[in-house]
Amino acid sequence: MTEKLVIIGNGMAPGRMLEHLFEAAPDRYQVTIFNAEPRVNYDRIMLSPVLSGEKSFEEIVIHGDGWYIANGVLLYKGHKIIAIDRVAKTVTSDKGITESYDKLVVATGSVPFLIPVPGHDLPGVITYRDLDDVSAMLLAAQSQDKAVVIGGGLLGLEAAAGLRERGMNVTVLHVMPTLMERQLDPAAGYLQKAVEARGIEVITKADTKAILGEKRVTGVELKDGRIIPASLVVMAVGIRPNVALAKEAGLETGRGIAVDASMQTSDPSILALGECVEVGGRTYGLVAPLYQMARVAAEKLAGAPEPRFEHSETPTKLKVTGIDLYSVGDFADGDDREEIVLRDATAGVYKRLVLKDNRIIGAVLFGETGDGAWFAELQKKEADIASMRDTLIFGQAFQGGASADPLAAVAALADDAEICGCNGVCKSKIVSTILSKGLTGLDDVRAHTKASASCGTCTPLVEKLMTLTLGDSYNPAAVQPVCSCTTLGHDEIRRLIKAKQLKTIPAIMQELEWKTSCGCAKCRPALNYYLIADWPDQYADDYQSRFINERVHANIQKDGTYSVVPRMWGGVTSASELRAIADVVDKFAIPAVKVTGGQRIDMLGIKKEDLPAVWADLGEAGFVSGHAYAKGLRTVKNLRRYRLVPLRNAGFHRFRHSHRKIHVGLVDSRQGEDGGVGLSA
């Protein structure tokens, strides 16, 4: 008989748990998920690339709506569970939905810590934990210019880098003498220099006294009297397990929800996993142990005998483009410990290995991190490194006294060597999957094994494995140039525009060594778009660098003719407007006219040389471009006669001809993004 499984929370850990569960016992449970966020499951560790503009939300979605439908999962979006009745075995959401369960999984995650100083609740003070926080930062970056990030840990530095990429002046305040003091040793000095080189001010030993402002934040006051101006303050000073719901339900809690090694809580019908739990006296915030919890919980639900979660050291990686940092293990001083250190201040490279009894117990790599996974593997296996001690710091490729073929180093890895730490994927799984499924591309490997699908740090290692496995048949995705004017691809150009502060098309072409003096019809529109997106307040749109459709306000057709779509506000027209369109059709012998799905009239087959005259006549009749030719505001459709329209919580309002006013008010001929507006009863 199918059992009812209810999951509270839809983060990465419960999502991975369901993947394992559907593989092991696909028909055992009827699954219902309550997600406090109004969206599907996404990769939280990729929020920083979303903030910096390197990725979109769609690119970090793990399970789209189709996945839930295909697996028969009922997902309640935007429903926060407010009560667990352990006697009746039900949960109740803040929207009034009550659901019964046979098994319950609590995955409420963590809550960000707010420094309890005066002003911490002012508008403009936010945390950095989910997509809503990223959206708030992006919105602030459009209208504000000064940001202060409190906290110099992983999240704080990633937030600071993202806001700097968005054009804000950023100051990082850190209470300790060095950045990321939990993960780093003296390498923090190298890190601070790299952060400051990106135009980010770093103030260490900065103890916050108060956040200033009346109606909105205006600055941060330090205990030494300094005042740092700010129109946005991001607190990234740590997290704590979200145990409130579990505690109210009477479950045993400590720092987190108490669970045993099988993720079982004090209630035999309830499991818990993720950042909200405490197992073996520890809480976890990195994705690798959370995914291990997910596997254990899935095995428990599937009926496996005594699955166990085992603690292991998890590497720390900073997700800031251009700053390579890798840290794993223990760095505490001790008389029984030795160090091997490599420093190259000019190249910005620092490597430090901490040894005990000829075994690696800690590693810090800055600047060159390619051997991080290998050092972590040696540390995890407690391997005796005595025989390679003299060359150990130079990495795996130098074992044997001289630089070896990097592929030979990958080939030498044991079959159980962990390649992807985030998802716990070993070498043998990747190789066997490539061969058994005939995979030829990195995206295929990501889809089938999850390797390289999270933070992406292991991507070079996965690509080497593919080269080793497939030989000449594998062509690592060479960068596809934007056009023949350059050898660079879109992503690299976008990165360099920001990194080199390039703010005009000529500056880009000169600095990035364009092969042509003026570019072409492919690259100029791309460069123009990137400059508008990256420097909206400093770059003036180059109208002649737009695509042909945008320049002539018409859609080019396969036969070389054009179609023209005059704007009709909200789909409403008049006899005089229709008569003007008919006159244009007759005057220029336009061969085809149709009504579009957007409540407009499309005239097709117009010659390019006729376009200026066509628009001149349409302009005299009061028409403007319908923007069917670019990523601008598209269609605002009207509703027939009277309708009642809910607007947020303001109640119902009469809606008659306001659709035309809404349409006119929303139009922005220089807008670069698609927009959608829905009005419904």
Image (cartoon, rainbow, N blue to C red):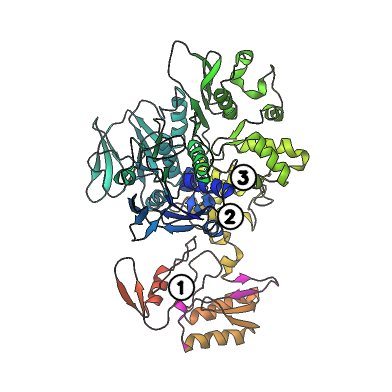
Mark 1 or mark 2, earlier in chain = 2
**Which label belongs to residue 608?**
none
From where the camera sits, is residue 501 visible?
Answer: no
Query: Alpha carbon of mark 1 to alpha carbon of mark 3: how far?
Result: 39 Å
Whether 588 is drawn above or below 449: the answer is: below
Q: Mark 1, residues whose alpha carbon is within 10 Å: few (<14), some, or many (≥20)?
A: many
Residue drawn at 40 percent across, 56 percent down: 100
Residue occupying the point 33% across, 35% down: 254
Q: Position of residue 47 (x, y in %)?
A: 47, 46
Residue 666 visible in rendering: yes
Disc 1 marks which amino acid? Val
Segment colored magenta: 554-574
Q: Amino acid at mark 2?
A: Ala
Q: Nearer the viewer, residue 34 or 240?
A: 34
Q: Secondary structure at mark 3?
A: helix
Quadrant containing the C terminus is: bottom left
Question: Badges 1 and 2: C-beta atoms under 8 Å apart?
Answer: no
Residue identifier under label 2: 526
Q: Seen in the image, is 380 located left or right of residue 574?
A: right
In which image quadrant can residue 178 be found? top left
